[in-house]
Amino acid sequence: MTDPKLIIHGGFFSESTDMNLKRAKQEALADIVSRAHAYLQNHSAVETVVFAVSLLEDNPLFNAGLGSQIQSDGEIRLSASLMDGQKPCFSGVINIQAVQNPIRIAEVLKDQDDHVLSGKEALNFARHAGFGDFNPETAERRSAFEKKLQETSGMGTVGCVALDSQGRLAAATSTGGKGFEMPGRVSDSATVAGNFANAHAAVSCTGVGEDIVNVALAAKIVTRVTDGFTLIEANEKSFLELKEFDGFAGAISISAKGEMVHLDSHPYMVWASYDTKLEVFE
């Protein structure tokens, strides 16, 4: 038996220097990781990462699901992916609209013949699977869009990686995009660059999607652990490659040995973990 553990992230704390917002995110992450850790005691890693990410999607403090960024044409498009490290199996949705929890749709897709869907076809699948209409826009995001607040405001994603009592690993990641992007842009969150797991390690990333894709960050970290690196060695080596072009990213990860690492290239990613005790970013 393995001691169950998990770590979650809520993107980067770059949207505001408001200390009240910082405390709100700390409290939200602490609550969600505690609930997810309790859930993990009697559920698998893959069930737990979906549970945790759905809670993050439902919290408007984070850029995924409710409260997602608005793109340059005024629309919101969501992407999410799930990877079961035990099988392994990757599934996801890209640029789906008008749904509440894209990670739940990725969960259903893992049992289909076609595991990744995009755009209106993803939405058609979701509707046929019983997922109802939902508007993820908030007044705050609309105000930011109207004022064209851009820069680093969209460097946010949510994710969870978990190790269950049977030693199984899983990763889930969800995003509302970077904000003001070109319609049709594909983020890293629904690719193996941003979300990857196998029997050896699980990784979820956040940051600038293009930077993460350019180094295949999640898949590379997992591959290095598979090839014998420790989890911290695999992270540090991969982030050195990101540093070569000043790439902007953060990653949370767990290995089958129980190692747990959170690392970012720029301060600072918001995260919370639960091993034998609760820990939250400061």
Image: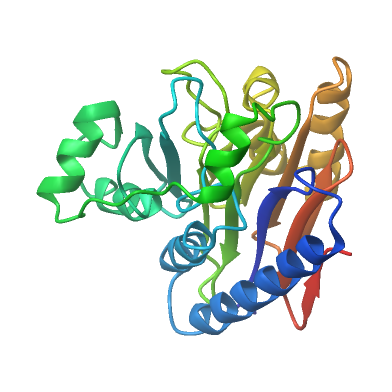
Q: Quadrant of residue 184?
A: top left
Q: Residue at x 60, y 53 (%)?
A: 62
Determine whether, in the image, residue 118 is placed left or right of residue 17.
Answer: left
Q: Is residue 258 at all visible to an observer of this figure?
A: no
Quarter-of-image position of residue 94: top left
Q: Quadrant of the N terminus?
A: bottom right
- Looking at the image, is 79 positioned above or below residue 180? below
Give the residue at x 79% y 43%.
Answer: 14
Above/below status of 8 relative to 248:
below
Query: Where 232 sits versus 18, above or below?
Result: above
28 vs 122, nearest the viewer: 28
Instruction: Say if 58 sits above or below 143 in the image.
Output: below
Q: Give me the residue at 76% from left, 61% from top.
A: 21
Q: Which quadrant of the figure contains the C terminus? A: bottom right
Asked whether 214 or 137 is in front, the reply is 137
Residue 148 visible to the viewer: yes
Percent position of residue 179, x then y: 58, 30
Percent of width and height locating residue 229: 79, 42
Q: Position of residue 32 (x, y in %)?
A: 60, 73
Q: Is residue 244 left or right of residue 142?
A: right
**Which residue is drawn at the image coordinates 34% and 56% (left, top)?**
104
Q: Position of residue 155 (x, y in %)?
A: 69, 36
